[in-house]
Structures are given as C-alpha cells and as structure tokens.
Image (tube, rainbow, N blue to C red):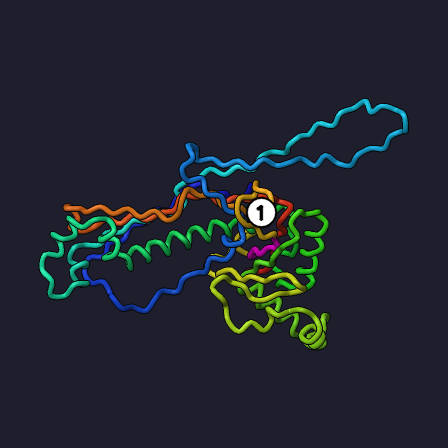
Amino acid sequence: MAGETTSSTYSTHSLSYILGVNAIPANLPSLVVSRLANEVDIEGQPSNVFQAAVLADLGAATGGTEGTAISSNTALSYASAVSGTVVEGALVRAVVTDNAVATKFPGLAGVAEAMQTLAFEQKLAVLQPEVNRLASMCFEKFEDDHCNLLSGFSNSVGSSGVDLSASTIFSSIYTYDTLDAVNQNRALVLTPNQIDELRRDLAVSGGGLGGALWNSQIDASFFNAAGLPADGAMGTFMGIPVYQYSHSLRTLMNANADVAGALMAIGSGDPTIAGNPVGALMTVRKGGLKVRMEQSAAERGTILVVGLEYVAVELKDTHGVTIVSDAP
C-alpha cells in the first residue's frame, strides 16, 4: 500500500511574553479527504494493529450434468487482509511561560504559583486557546496523511504535464466502472487548480465540449459554487459529488510536476461491520486528541504536548482511481 503513515511529526514552540486574547485567526486547511475514509477506533485494545479480513473473488460457478455428482470442492478463501498499525501520527510540543499566562489576568498577582496547583481541567480552561492551536497542527498532519494516499491507487487517468479536462473525468468514471467496485457511492476529490481547469474546460464556448451546452443542460453544480464550505463540498458533476481539498496539502507526483486528485468510494465507520460502506481509504486510531500538560520549573511555564495516535491506509485499491494533471 502506498503512502502509509509511518512516522510522527514533532515540533517545538515557546510562547514567552504576550498571548493575544483577541487575535485574527490563521488560515487553516479544511478536513476533506479524511472525512471520506472509513474509521476504526481501537482505543482500549491491547494491540496497535487492526486487521480487516478481505474475501477473495471465487470466480464464477461451473455448469453440471443432471444426475452426475459434483466431485470438486471450492475453497472459501480469503485475500490478503488490510492492516493498519497505529503510531503517534501527529505530535506537537509548546511551552507557555508563566509570564505569558499572567497576561491573561492583568492586575492579578500570584499567577505562576497558581498554575502549579491547578487541576488539569482548570489548566485546560486557562490554556484552551493555545491547546486549540496545537490541535489544529495535529489535524492538519492528519488530513495531509490522507491526502498523500490519493496518488497511490493502481488505476490512474490523466497525463503528466497536461491540464485536467472533462474528458479525463469521464475516463476516471469509466475506469471506476470497469473495476466492479462494491461501493458505487463515490466522489471526485480534486485540488483547487484541478477544479479551475475543469471549469475552464467546461466554460469554453464553441470548444470541443461546447460551454453553453454544459452550463445549461448537464449537471455541473460545482461550476457555480460561490465559496468553499468547511467540508470541501463544491456540488456535483454528472451526479457525482465534487470535493475540493486544500491547496496547501495538495499531493504532488512525478518530481512535483503534477498533482493528484481521485475518484474514490466514500467510506463510513468500521468496514468490517455489515452495512457500513467500504471506502477507498481507512483511518485506524486510538481515541481522539490527547492533551498532556506539565508544569516546568526549569522553563518557568507549562509544557503542552498535544497528539493524535492513528494511521491512514489504503483500504480497497479497486475503490479508487487517481486523477493526474499538471501542477500549478
């Protein structure tokens, strides 16, 4: 499987003077691809490994002759299991000094002493804005690991160095249809420049596709999307949901000459439970966001460590088609 999460990210930052109580928020990427994956939580399990059994394709049955016994048995075999080993996929550390915390309480003495005796919940209430910023870093890494899987499907369409066109999208639909995928609830997951190139291709009047025809007759609601929702949903094209994932997390291919989008199945929940749709990708995690705090006399402040334990893996290769096009 391509692009598994195999290592953690660890960075350090110290807030030593003034904390802005009211501040303009930073631009952050949306969680798009990760929301389309199956998800399994193995919190409390003794192992960090989750395995999903996969049934093998037994092929077609053979014919028989009336009155003649069937002499051969069919082995009810399994294909290779899909496994995911949870790691500390996202981890970040920061130090918030006592002087910085004191700026939250102007005129109040003894803040440093109070921080040493506060319970965890009380400290969290004081440092929640800083914890939230570190959490955003973890979720960005989480999303990036899922985005990186888009280039790993065995089946791909498009050409290196060539802009995305409607013809390439049609090829992805055709290719997906040839795979006999169990899950036909699929979505187009594209980068901003791929969305732009597709719009331009559809809007060219008198071009090979005839822009007037497409804009008035064919389902292309993504074409008129006024903004980008938090989940990246742009509308539909040919009845297929269109999602735009963040430009800053775009997956590059072919020596950074191209970007990767995908036509992929949408998953939900544990894929081994009957009734849950089996997507192209899977997240295995141990619990949710983990926040740890420790008062440090040496650093005269509070050490914050925030992390996520997870792995992002390709779940079913035949439930995805990579869409390759020129990078901006």
Residue 190 percent location from the top left of the image: 56, 60
Residue 252 percent location from the top left of the image: 52, 54
Q: Which of 218 and 155 is in front in this view?
A: 218
Residue 99 percent location from the top left of the image: 15, 58
Residue 263 in magenta?
yes
Q: Nearer the viewer, residue 68 or 98?
A: 68
Q: What element carries label 1?
A: loop
Numbered range of the magenta stretch: 258-264
Q: Tell me the quarter of the picture where residue 196 sits.
A: bottom right
Residue 322 in magenta?
no
According to the image, label 1 marks what residue? 276
Q: Which residue is drawn at 69% across and 72% down?
A: 214
Residue 328 appears in the rendering: no
Query: Is the stretch drawn in magenta largely helix, strand or loop?
Result: strand
Q: Which of 46 and 322 is in front in this view?
A: 46
Kind of residue at badge 1? Asn
Q: Which residue is drawn at 46% across and 37% down?
A: 85
Residue 208 appears in the rendering: yes
Q: Tell me the quarter of the picture where residue 159 sits.
A: bottom right
